[in-house]
Amino acid sequence: MWLRLKLKKEIKMTKTLIKGALKTWKEDRGFGFISPDDGGKDIFIHISALKGTSRRPVTGDVIYYQIAKDNRGKYKAINAHIEGVEILEDNATGLLNKKGIILLAFAVVVVVTAVVVLYTV
């Protein structure tokens, strides 16, 4: 049995943000289509393009996005955000990411150890 790998290489990404309205959204499948404000064909959008948004999209939302062409030649929205919706901090840069929690726990252990040593001497 051969294992076939799918590469998710994106090419020809637009540099500027494009504005459009979310025309359809299939919540159960996590995707929909954006109708660009300047006309043209509807653009596919997957929930993964909306990383960090504080809520899921709903039909009618104004979406700002870039367009990329995937390895199958289809266009899709990437690096998208919903107008007026807060963007949450990325987990990798947040204060309480995995490394931050480990460092905080280590600091607490050091402080408690120092206090115990000072009061037992």
Image (cartoon, grey):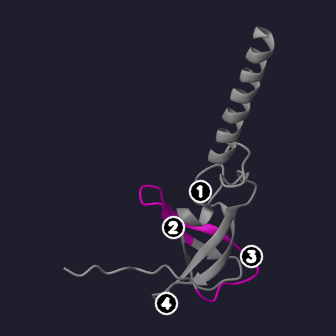
The residue labelled by disc 2 is 32
Q: Are marks 4 and 2 in contact (CB under 8 Å)?
A: no
Helix, strand or loop for disc 3: loop
Amino acid type of disc 1?
Pro
Query: What's the CA distance linking mark 4 and mark 2?
Result: 18 Å
In this view, the residue farthest toward the left is 1
Residue density around tag 1, few if under 14, some if 14–19, many if 20 or more, within 10 Å: many
Q: Position of residue 62 (x, y in %)?
A: 69, 64
Q: Are marks 3 and 2 in contact (CB under 8 Å)?
A: no
| Residue designated by label 4 | 73
Residue nearest the observer in this picture, 89 or 32 = 89
Q: Where is mark 1, residue-wise?
A: 57
**Callout in the foreground (1, 4):** 4
Residue drawn at 68 percent across, 35 percent down: 106
**Helix, strand or loop at mark 1:** loop
Choose mark 1 or mark 3, whichever is in front.
3
Q: Residues within 10 Å of mark 2 (few under 14, many from 20)?
A: many
| Distance in Å between CA atoms under marks 3 and 4 | 20 Å
